[in-house]
Amino acid sequence: MIAEISMHRLVLIGVGLIGGSLALDLKRAARVEEVVGIDIDADNLTRALERRVIDCAYECINAESMADADMVLIATPVNTLPIICRQLAPFLTDRCIVTDVGSTKQLALQAFAAELPQHYERCVAAHPIAGSDRHGALAAQFGLFAAKKCIICAHEQQDKTALQAVEAMWQAVQAQIYHLDAARHDAIFAAVSHLPHMLAYAYVHQLAEAANADELLQFAGSGFRDFTRIAASHPQIWTDICLANRQVLAGLLEKQQQELAYLKQCLQDGDAQKLTAFFAKAQKIRESWQNEQIQATAGVPAGR
Amino acid sequence: MIAEISMHRLVLIGVGLIGGSLALDLKRAARVEEVVGIDIDADNLTRALERRVIDCAYECINAESMADADMVLIATPVNTLPIICRQLAPFLTDRCIVTDVGSTKQLALQAFAAELPQHYERCVAAHPIAGSDRHGALAAQFGLFAAKKCIICAHEQQDKTALQAVEAMWQAVQAQIYHLDAARHDAIFAAVSHLPHMLAYAYVHQLAEAANADELLQFAGSGFRDFTRIAASHPQIWTDICLANRQVLAGLLEKQQQELAYLKQCLQDGDAQKLTAFFAKAQKIRESWQNEQIQATAGVPAGR
């Protein structure tokens, strides 16, 4: 049975692409009466108010901004989670649920346990897979989460009601719920998200260092455009994510260096057979993935 | 002054995305009366005839298929160029122009000079920048080249009339003509096209090698989708391109290994400042590139 969610007041800490888009959909679906936005960027809050992403705005966490909160959703860069939890602690009522949307989940659970020990049962670590190179309240959009995955990493002391409420909130915006252990989540997303971000940055950085960078970029086409889209992502956000997951990522970078060493050797040997086999293995798996995506999202309007 | 092109018969060797799309646009603009398609894949020829990409089809180069050709456009994988030129030699009339569309231009000029020495003046090396992970006659589409760049690498013995005819042909399909020395062309495209293809293949290959590859791919999102799109490209075509340009590419792979080593060290040191500076340098240049693209293509209908 799927629980339905209906909140009086949602407090959104960090009014950006993820939090803002969630607020828009929840309000449209009449699942929340009021969204309170808290953000350190006053201009961003103004834009969020103008676009009706939020109903009222505060620049800090205090008794007034936190009053009557049913749910607090933290949607700020991952390394800010401990300090935000510390600031929240005095203002949480027993019934309030705390949840996040960060890309690294072990760190989130550590922050909840360390900074909100009294409230840990009602802290739910979640990660909706709907990133973008866009950010800020202006990036918020309706329908962002439709048919997208949302991973929830329940912990051993998890309160069931809190867990179900967070699940129901994401289901209300059409996300598909998956459950993963936090360590497994972090290992998976290191491979399919964090590593490609680092590699895209590394490639563009190499171009930027070239003496004729401007000339090179003049001739970049659609392959370059797509390959480097994620290199336009927010540097601070991705520094935090990469450092939060640094151990797994360092191992993956090591493996990628080995792949490049192999390719370089193939070029130096002029070995067409090995190169084709290598490319074909990648091409085949990429093509099956694409076909599965098309099947999985058949009938769903395009996101982004 | 821009010359206009009007051909009686264009012979297309290799009826795929590039050659097929060119034929569609030239026919629609009434710049060619008849397009002859030559391809070793009989099924592909059938599809090309059905879709009216070509007007008649042959499976080999001979007196009949080559009769009355004004222009021969070679649009096959780059390493087939020498053998195709050798086969063409007996059937070329003095006035016929030979041109190609390959991604490596030094190799094209070498093949023209070695295999068609009598005809070298009328051989024009060109490279339209409109690649895709799609291939074959079914991938052919109208408008593929609108507002796209087409690089022409004239050589020292180039006949001016032949050069102008090839320029006019690409201008007729709305491409923007650029002139580059062949060696410079190859160095530029190694950096902005061939290297990212190798890197995308290398990353997907690493995922494919993982014990839990299927689980990983299940959680791949839109960042993964765009970053790896070019890893779905044709393995044989890209083996040929990479080997044709192997010297420059090996050097670029070496530099990329150094970028990864630097990132790995940043992770191991937990150095947020260095990581952010690295990411920010890449992000800044990617963002300016995107803004310039938007300005440059303002008013042009979206491709692909």
Image (cartoon, coloured by chain):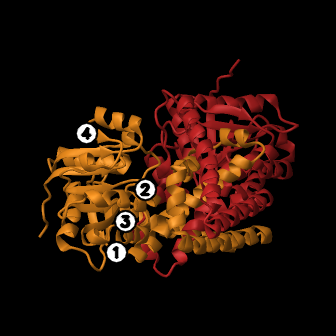
Chain colours: A red, B orange
- Distance Cα–Cα, label 4 vs label 1: 34 Å
Residue situated in front as seen by the camera: B86 or A124: B86
Q: Circle 3 sits on which residue?
A: B292
Label 2 crowd (10 A; few <14 / some 14-19 / many >=20): some
Q: Circle 1 sits on which residue?
A: B180
Frontmost of labels 3 and 1 is 1
- Distance Cα–Cα, label 3 vs label 4: 42 Å
Image position, residue A281 (x, y; %): 64, 47
Write the residue at 52% across / 42% down: A55
Q: Are marks 3 and 2 in contact (CB under 8 Å)?
A: no
- Distance Cα–Cα, label 2 vs label 4: 32 Å
Q: Circle 2 sits on which residue?
A: A222
Q: Circle 4 sits on which residue?
A: B56
Secondary structure beneath dot 3 equals helix
Residue A240 in which image quadrant: bottom right
Mark found first going from the N terminus, 4 or 1? 4
Amino acid type, callout 4: Cys
Frontmost of labels 3 and 2 is 2
